[in-house]
Image (cartoon, rainbow, N blue to C red):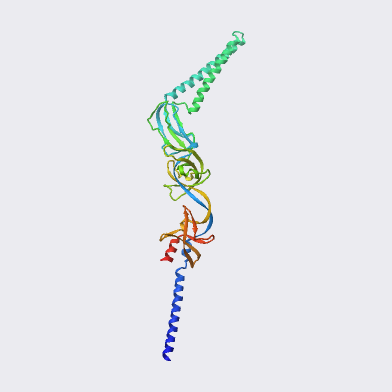
């Protein structure tokens, strides 16, 4: 009888101990999976949404200045380059002096101006004298008419020379000053101090371009041409600013193929805030387009790839976080489309979810 009581008491104590251990283990386990306030501040939660499935086309291109805002400056006279006041890449203002050319042609224009002014003065005096003689009946009317024609001819010649001075921007010296016709940047320079220029020189001295707005010219492979539409949103990335996305739209499709590359060019216009985009920069262009179907979508950074599967951390509460496998249909730069594994309205962790994953699955 005593042995039975002893065994019963021992079993009771063991049962209580086992229950206490299980309860303690459950409490410790609950505490282990409880997100702290610090961790909650570090993670980001996103809601699963049903969205139209989009695809992405990646193209290679380069940054070029807006051709409508680029002006090439040619020498209007020949001569010796006395001054060059700007360098490649300088920001210049409209009317700013770029270079000075000492030219014999300018000296000739000055001689023509003096000659035209003198001829006009002589013609005017001759007309005045002829009119006085006509009033005195000493000369016929045809002499007056001829004198007036000479005045008109001399005035026309003076006007022609003045127009040349105006077009060339000439002054009273024999120097020709090259000025910038617009505000912009020097994007090409082909002149140096001491250079001799011929009057028939066909090469531009400077190229000035405004780069507040720039173009990105991208090449489209022949197989991808049917996907390209005007107005498609475009995300442009560069090596220099790898973490920054420049957004624009396809505003022109060049409907011809390059005979060498067999590619078609498209143009994306971008606002160049802070002049970050420089002409001739290499660019990667991502074009997004809809496929016509709908699926559940989450941020791409929410996906965890481990053990040859894709996982997401589904958030129910701070103490209930589920590691769930998902079937990925397509992953883009920012959005991933899920074929199965998630329902609309569920919440997933999209930032620092790997820390939670490791804590739950170690």
Q: Is residue 70 above or below residue 292?
A: above
On the image, the x and y values in percent for residue 95 come to 48, 34
Q: Residue furthest bottom?
A: 1
Q: Residue at x 53, y 18 (%)?
A: 154
Residue 317 is left or right of residue 202, and the answer is right
- Nearest to the observer: residue 319 or residue 303: 303
Q: Pick the quarter of the image with the N terminus.
A: bottom left
On the image, the x and y values in percent for residue 229 come to 52, 44
Q: Residue at x 51, y 25 (%)?
A: 163
Q: Pick the quarter of the image with the C terminus.
A: bottom left
Q: Residue furthest top?
A: 138
On the image, the x and y values in percent for residue 360 come to 44, 66
- Nearest to the observer: residue 47 or residue 272: 47
- Total marks shown come to 0
On the image, the x and y values in percent for residue 218 come to 46, 42
Q: Is residue 69 above or below residue 297?
A: above
């Amino acid at each position: 009888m005593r042995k039975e009581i002893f065994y019963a008491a021992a079993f009771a104590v063991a049962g209580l101990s086992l229950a206490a251990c299980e309860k303690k283990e459950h409490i410790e386990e609950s505490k282990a999976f409880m997100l702290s306030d610090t961790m909650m501040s570090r993670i980001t939660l996103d809601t699963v949404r049903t969205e139209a499935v989009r695809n992405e086309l990646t193209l290679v291109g380069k940054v070029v200045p807006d051709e409508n805002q680029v002006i090439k400056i040619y020498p209007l006279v020949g001569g010796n380059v006395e001054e060059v006041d700007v360098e490649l890449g300088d920001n210049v203002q409209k009317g700013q002096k770029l270079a000075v050319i000492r030219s014999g042609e300018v000296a000739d224009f000055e001689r023509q101006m003096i000659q035209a002014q003198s001829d006009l003065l002589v013609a005017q005096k001759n007309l005045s004298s002829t009119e006085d003689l006509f009033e005195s009946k000493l000369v016929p009317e045809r002499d007056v008419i001829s004198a007036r024609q000479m005045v008109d001819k001399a005035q026309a010649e003076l006007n022609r020379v003045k127009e040349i001075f105006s077009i060339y921007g000439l002054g009273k010296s024999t120097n020709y000053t090259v000025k910038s016709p617009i505000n912009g940047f020097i994007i090409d320079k082909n002149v140096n101090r001491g250079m001799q220029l011929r009057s028939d020189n066909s090469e531009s001295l400077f190229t000035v371009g405004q780069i507040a707005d720039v173009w990105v010219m991208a090449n489209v492979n022949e197989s991808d041409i049917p996907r390209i539409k005007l107005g498609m949103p475009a995300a442009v990335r560069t090596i220099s600013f790898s973490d920054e996305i420049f957004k624009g739209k396809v505003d022109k499709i060049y409907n011809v193929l390059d005979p060498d590359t067999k590619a078609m060019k498209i143009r994306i216009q971008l606002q160049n805030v802070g002049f970050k985009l420089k002409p001739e920069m290499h660019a990667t262009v991502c074009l997004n387009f809809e496929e016509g179907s709908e699926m559940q979508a989450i941020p791409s950074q929410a996906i965890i790839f481990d053990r040859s599967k894709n996982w997401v951390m589904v958030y129910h509460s701070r103490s209930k976080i589920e590691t769930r496998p998902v079937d990925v249909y397509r992953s883009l730069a920012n959005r991933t489309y899920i074929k199965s594994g998630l329902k609309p309205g569920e919440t997933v962790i999209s930032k620092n979810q790997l820390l939670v994953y490791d804590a739950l699955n170690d």
